[in-house]
Each structure stands twice: as structure tokens, then as C-alpha cells.
Image (tube, rainbow, N blue to C red):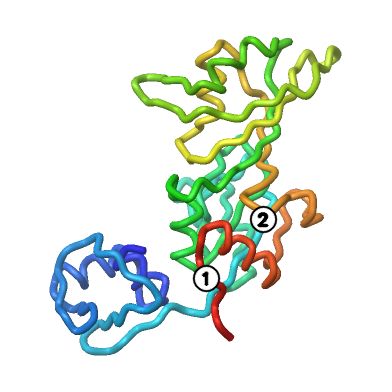
Amino acid sequence: MRLQTYIAHSGRCSRRKAEALIASGHVTVNGQRVTQMGIEVDEHTLVAVDGQPIQLAPTQTFALNKPRGVITTLSDPKGRPCVGDIIAEIGLPLYPVGRLDRESCGLLLLTNDGLLASRLMHPRYQIPRLYRVAVEGKLRDAELIPLRKGVRQQEEPFEPMKVHLLEYRPIAQHSILEVTVHEGHNREIRRAFESIGAKVVFLERQAVGPIRLERLHLPRGAWRPLTERQVNALRAACRLKTPSK
């Protein structure tokens, strides 16, 4: 993970303050003073601030079943409902792994393990994210071919998606689909369907890698810590070693 993120996740200060400490020469990495942002470090790197070694806080990872209408931030200056309100009682500095837009719901992982978070979000590690999607109207399988090949919207290319048409519900006039992606572009699925003239009316994230919402038995708006076994499964998916006890 990046040096400023490492410092922030140690609990020493915020990431913005960490950047200021680096720029002003207060930080050393393996005994060498650094003043540039973006240096990559890990749990084996010796990082010190003003000569005092710092370490990452004990890591914990939680799962939240995010409701619709809640934004994926820890606070909101406009006073809108946010994830930080829901997890405040946990009393730990946790950070969302990626985002779910305000109108989407489902599985959101939160952790203070910066390395795990960065691996889960990095396209290199191809961590699948499974969604259940409802779209207005009756879609035909042939209409989904562009999504499976990869589409471009407003000059932004989207990766090929795995799209499975499950059913059409005539009363609601909605098509129900399962969609799997490996990247995290802003509103990627909604925008991809827009590119073929289809409007998403419901989107729920059902899985991130090996962690599936249905196996967690979490009501909407509820959270719980992942078990050691679940965290180790996530780490294995990201090609991270299991921490030694």
C-alpha cells in the first residue's frame, strides 16, 4: 500500500496529515528519509515518524448489508445518511472497500487492513463482484452481447462482463439478471446498461470474491465481523499470505 495510507491505517493521523508529514521530511522508510508521495510499503517495511517506528493497528474486516439511500462514506457534510452512521457503534477506524452508489444496496466490506483493501480493489487481482440487477423492460439475450464483449461510454472503456439473464417478471415488467465484474468504475453496471438503452432500477451486490451475502444472514442495514476463516479466504483470493499467529 502507499506510504501515506500505511501511516493513516496505523492510527497515527489522517491520510491528509500523513501526506503533510511526508512532504515536510518527518518520515523515514527503512532508515531513509522520504518526501515523495506514493512509495509502496507493506507490513515488513520499517516506517518511522520523527524517529518513532509505527505499525499497523490490529486488522479487522467487517461485512455490511448496505441499504439503499445510504452513501458509502464515513461522514457527509450535507447530513445525508452514510455508512459511517451505521458502523459508528463499532468504535474502530474502518474504511469501505470500494463503493456502492447511493441507490445500490448489498454487500459492502469494511476494513482497517490497507493491504487487503488495496488488493481487493486492484484490477490486477481480478476479484469478482457478483450483482443481482433488475432492468426495465424485457431484454433478449442477444441485447447483452455488447456487455459481454466490453462497451465504451463517454470514451471510458468497460471490461467485458459476465451477464446471465435469469427471468422476466411481467407484472413488474422487469428483467432480472446476474452480473459479474472485476473492476470498480463509478456506476459501472448502470452506465453499461445505459449504453444498450436499458435502465437499471435495482442493483444489489451479492458477493465479493469468496464472501457471499446470502451466507452471512445479514438483514439490510446490519453488519458483523468476518470470521478468521472468511478473512483468510479473502486474503488467499488476493494472493496474500495468512498472517502467522
Residue 89: quarter of image: bottom right
- Looking at this view, is 197 or 77 the one in front? 197
Query: Residue 154 location in percent, x, y?
Result: 37, 19
Q: Which residue is under mark 1?
A: 241
> In the rendered view, does 206 fall on the left or right side of 97?
right
Identify the residue at image location x=25%, y=60%. 38
Q: Is residue 136 above or below residue 118?
A: above
| Element at label 1 | loop
Residue type (three-letter) at the residue carrying disc 1:
Lys
Query: Residue 35 location in percent, x, y?
Result: 14, 69
Identify the residue at image location x=32%, y=63%. 2
Q: Is residue 145 above or below residue 216?
A: above
Q: Which residue is under mark 2?
A: 64
For marks 1 and 2 on the same chain, the one whose residue lies earlier in the sequence: 2
> In the rendered view, does 178 fall on the left or right side of 161?
right
- Considering the image in quadrants, where does the N terminus appear? bottom left
Residue type (three-letter) at the residue carrying disc 2:
Leu
Q: Are marks 1 and 2 in contact (CB under 8 Å)?
A: no
- Considering the image in quadrants, where does the C terminus appear? bottom right
